[in-house]
Amino acid sequence: MTRTLTGSERDRFVAALRQEIGDSAVSTEPDDLATYGRDWTKVFDPAPMAIAFPRRTEDVVEIVRRCADDGIAIVPSGGRTGLAGGAVAARGELVVSTERMRDLGAVDTRALTLRAQAGAVTAAVHAHCEPHGVTWPVDFASKGSSQIGGNIATNAGGVKVIRYGLTRQWVLGLEVVTANGDVLELGGALEKNNTGFDLRQLFIGSEGTLGIITGATLKLTRVPGHLDVLLFAVPDLAGVLRLFDAARVGPFVISAFEFFTDRCFARLARHRALSMPLETPSSHYVLLEVEAHDRGALERWLESLFERDLILDGTLAQSAGQGRALWELREGISESLSATGMPHKNDIALPIATLDAFVSELDAVFTKEWPRFEICLFGHIGDGNLHVNVMKPDDMPKAEFLAHAHESDAAMFELVRKHHGSISAEHGVGLLKKDFLGYSRSPAELEMLRAIKRTLDPEGLLNPGKIL
Amino acid sequence: MTRTLTGSERDRFVAALRQEIGDSAVSTEPDDLATYGRDWTKVFDPAPMAIAFPRRTEDVVEIVRRCADDGIAIVPSGGRTGLAGGAVAARGELVVSTERMRDLGAVDTRALTLRAQAGAVTAAVHAHCEPHGVTWPVDFASKGSSQIGGNIATNAGGVKVIRYGLTRQWVLGLEVVTANGDVLELGGALEKNNTGFDLRQLFIGSEGTLGIITGATLKLTRVPGHLDVLLFAVPDLAGVLRLFDAARVGPFVISAFEFFTDRCFARLARHRALSMPLETPSSHYVLLEVEAHDRGALERWLESLFERDLILDGTLAQSAGQGRALWELREGISESLSATGMPHKNDIALPIATLDAFVSELDAVFTKEWPRFEICLFGHIGDGNLHVNVMKPDDMPKAEFLAHAHESDAAMFELVRKHHGSISAEHGVGLLKKDFLGYSRSPAELEMLRAIKRTLDPEGLLNPGKIL
């Protein structure tokens, strides 16, 4: 079991660690403790004992062994852009930041692979690949800060999942330091390797609770050709789904199918002074991005949507600038909700077949129980992922709102369970969702998760209290 | 621990099981024991105690609980097309065949999902999807017999991996019966579900040693458009790889990049009386299948290969019939090797960057140590996967050949380890490769595999002796 050190014990531990991995590689500065002890959730007060900045895998091994000897809990830390508290250190843990481990190997254009240290920033990986006409297709709003190791530890999603899948599909090899200080090289640079259980996949998405990811061999893909961006107005969620059906058989490859409601747009318009490029106002909007090899066929498909009454209005961007402007309508939502009020966020997934029924039932529950709450819905409909934002009424005290939001979460998660959905589609569990895990995992599954945690980390050294 | 029953104990067990899951659901017929006790390896003598044919997941639960009570080992069994002995029952085990569990749900064309029982045959899944213009893109030679559950348990590969990845990318949800009889519903029909360790991925590829897969929600994709098939002659393996580089940046999506040597072709020509459609003879041939949206661009690319001296000869199939004929050159190899001699098979993977060096070193070792062995090389070069077939010299006794082959395997696996490859790319480990597992997994990894096995199956009930 891990424990909290006294002040003098901490000083001795820090001094010994500095001797091993370098003076500048360990910080106890209050600013650093505050910064590296939290992630984007900002719900928990940070209180780490110190921050370690290893440069090499061997440093991480040394850190883990010392922590194991002294019973000190470790919080692995990447770009700290997580939204579930997975990188929060609030109980005297040692934070192990990978930010100085950011070496990138040469891009292998034949095998389409790239070796990266865990601390490499996602956008830096993209920039490193770009001159070669290839990319690592994991792409989301926080890519300027998020790190490869954190992406892998949380199995990050994003806007391109409908085309490329989640992070776990784009990792061939993984270097992991285990709780007893072993370095595992899992999978290497191989696409195919059926030699026993895939430990690599077990570590991906385990949020730092089973091992510390120190490096990876990333699988790359060619940069897609020209992407067309379209925006549509449809009357309701059923209309969104009918449009999705039409897009599924359209003359193109879908790279994003995103939706948002008029409530989201109203707050975006207020915050960023943007206007809607469609003439027909509606309650539901869809952004579609496609790779079309035949522009004429794309235009005919668009015309057919009007003829088939599948859309109220629609537009196809005629330039890269127009395409970016349409994307801003979708990508500016999250910031605009926070700028114009206080959102309580959830990130859920439903089987697409049940989305319409789920949202109807959710509306009914809120209308009855919490009629003053405004729900702002947006998300990656194409893969069943809804971001549900409940906005605090301006005249309601924060504490009262949070108490109600806790109740409404439980009501929503009941509906999620009923429809066989997930309480956390892409954000993970961390600290924020762990009380609700039972809505998505059965008692037998939870027992198996705990058993695996005990097997791989019997002393509870790695990110204790997260997920389980 | 499991044990072997006496004759009367066996009779009592079978009678009790019949009462529970039906008279016709348990067989002790010698023909059935011989058939269901082996897979395609044909190396081990089958000796199961009985064969159970459950129809429902509840039957499997009942079987597992009774076996757990009586200490009887279970061998989960699908289409038995495995090539590593993973479905062999040679030590009095109860074989649990899923072949009567073959229900398929409705194709969800919106979500692109399909629910299938484990015993559904791969080709039946393809046929079920075809009218909807979608498919499950797991495709290989034994698809007429192999079952979904076995594909998932072995993480099957095949000729389309370069485009679609392995089976593990095409399974959204998994129903598994655990060693203590719990039924886990993992992942549901969700693309996104980050709620703790991905147990689904842990079961995929575990060869029936951690749980019995009884059903799955498969992820589907649209059937690709027209596929063009090309055949090339190149001077050597380096030439194969240079051609691969050119294909990587060609005006198309690659759906297969396969290679074979003249030795493979000579045996194919002998067995099936086929002729080579290229005029220039060579030692190395490449079959390329692509989805090209611009036929003119494809033809110009082909011309440029001649101009750049990247190929000795090449042809583009002008009809579907010609395309099938080119594919027969590749897909007929395995059968032709067995028909014209006795092949000793290996299925290895290397990082593509090391393929050329590996094959040179392999040739040198064989020339020096086993000069009379003919090596027939073919495989899915695009994902680093080589099928290495060592042919028995006609005048060498079988026992002598097998003894030498065992030595040459060890020498080859040393080279595989040196180049960070895998001793089993897609066939798995089963019984046949378990002695060599240490060439691809470190002692720390092996210990972790064993610990996970102990955690999920403490009594060693499920497929004991396989992998580990």
Image (cartoon, coloured by chain):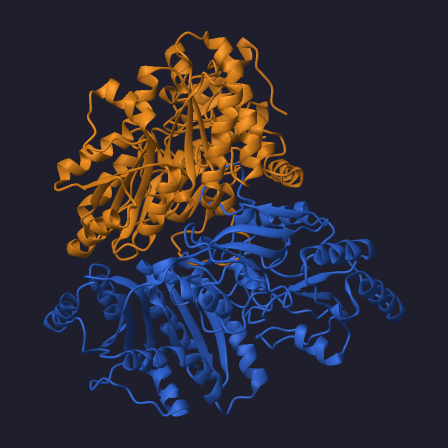
Chain colours: A orange, B blue
User: Quick one: A125 or B19, which is closer to the camera?
Assistant: B19
Q: Position of residue A86 (x, y in %)?
A: 48, 27
Q: How many marks?
A: 0
**Quadrant in the picture for residue A284:** top left
Q: Is residue A217 left or right of residue B82?
A: left
Quadrant into which the N terminus of chain A falls: top right
A407 is higher (above) or lower (below) than A282: above
Q: Position of residue B225 (x, y in %)?
A: 29, 65
Q: Is residue A453 left or right of residue A216?
A: right
Q: Position of residue B299 (x, y in %)?
A: 15, 71
Quadrant into which the C terminus of chain A falls: top right
Q: Is residue B193 left or right of residue B367?
A: right
**Which residue lies most toward the left here?**
B307
User: Quick one: B442 or B463, which is closer to the camera?
Assistant: B463
**Quadrant in the picture for residue B166:** bottom left
A37 is higher (above) or lower (below) than B396: above
User: Quick one: B201 or A455, which is closer to the camera?
Assistant: B201
**Quadrant in the picture for residue B313:** bottom left
B112 is higher (above) or lower (below) than A204: below
Q: Position of residue B410 (x, y in %)?
A: 50, 67
Does residue B356 appear anywhere in the picture? no
Q: Determine the residue positioned at 52% across, 78% down.
A: B404
Q: Determine the residue positioned at 31% across, 58% down.
A: B353
Q: Determine the residue positioned at 17% across, 46% down.
A: A131
Does residue A420 appear anywhere in the picture? yes
User: Quick one: B424 or A430, which is closer to the camera?
Assistant: A430
